[in-house]
Image (cartoon, rainbow, N blue to C red):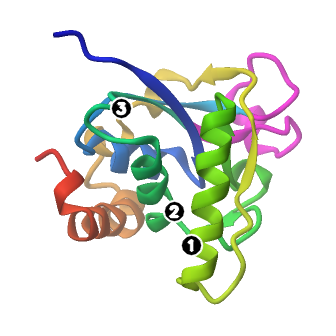
Amino acid sequence: MTESKELATLGGGCFWCTEAVFSGARGVLRVRPGYAGGATRNPTYEEVCTGQTGHAEVIQIEFDPAKISYRDILTIFFHTHDPTTKNRQGGDSGTQYRSVILVHSPEQQQVAQELIRDLTAEKLWTGPIVTEVVPYTTFYVAEEYHHAYYKKNPERGYCQMIIAPKLAKFRHEFADRWAP
C-alpha cells in the first residue's frame, strides 16, 4: 500500500514553534522550516529578519491525507498560534511573523476560506482573524540549524517559555492527532 502525499505551507510566527507542533502530528510525514511569500530569491535568515524581503517564516508540511486532512492541519494551525495579530506572534514582530496560509490548489484555498468563516462564526477569539490566504509560489528551505530546533534545543529559554506551552496545548486539545 502506497501512502499519498500532499503539501501544506503555513506561517504562524516563528517557524521553530510551528515545526515542533506539526512534527508531532499523526499523518505528518515531514516538516521543513523555510521562507515563502516574498520577492527575494534564496533569502537568508538574516535577510528575512530585516522584514525587507517580504518573506514569512513558514513551514512546509508533507502529509498523508488518508491519515490527516488538510482541514485538520489548518485547524491545528489556527489553535496553536494567534491568528488575530497582524505581523506579530507574542514578542516576535514584523512581516516575517505574519499569519499566512500559502495554498497549493483551488481546493486548499476553498478549505482555508471555509474554515476561516467557520472559526469567525464560532467567535473563538476577541479580534478578527487576519490570516492571509495567498497562492503558493516558491519555498526556500531554511538554514540547517533551524531544522528540528526544539528537538535539538529543548533547554533553551525560548523553547521552554514559548514552544513547550504550544506543544502542551496541542497535545491536550488534539490528543487524537498527536503521534506519541
Q: Nearer the viewer, residue 125 or 4?
A: 4
Which residue, given by chain and number where applicable, does mark 3 sit on?
Answer: 65
Which residue, given by chain and number where applicable, does mark 2 sit on?
Answer: 78
Q: Which residues are magenta?
A: 37-58
| Label 3 to label 2: alpha-carbon separation | 18 Å
Which percent across, then down, holds residue 128? Answer: 72, 78
Which percent across, then down, holds residue 136? Answer: 71, 29
Which percent across, then down, holds residue 105? Answer: 66, 29
Q: Residue at position x 50%, y 27% from top? A: 7
- Mark nearest the camera among 2 and 1 is 1
Q: Disc 2, disc 1: CB below 8 Å?
A: yes
Q: Residue furthest bottom?
A: 126
Q: Is residue 51 magenta?
A: yes
Mark 3 nearby-residue class (10 Å; few <14, some 14–19, many ≥20): some
Q: Disc 1, disc 3: CB below 8 Å?
A: no
Q: Residue at position x 26%, y 51% from top? A: 154
Q: Residue at position x 28%, y 31% from top? A: 66
Q: Is residue 57 magenta?
A: yes
Q: Is residue 178 left or right of residue 95?
A: left
Report helix, strand or loop for mark 3.
loop
- Residue 119 has which mark? 1
Q: Is residue 68 above or below residue 163?
A: above
Q: Is residue 128 left or right of residue 51?
A: left
Q: Amino acid at mark 2?
A: Phe
Which percent across, then down, holds residue 4? Answer: 34, 18
Q: Nearer the viewer, residue 128 or 154?
A: 128
Q: Give whichever of discs 3 and 2 has the lower sequence position.
A: 3
Q: Disc 3, disc 2: CB below 8 Å?
A: no
| Total numbered labels | 3
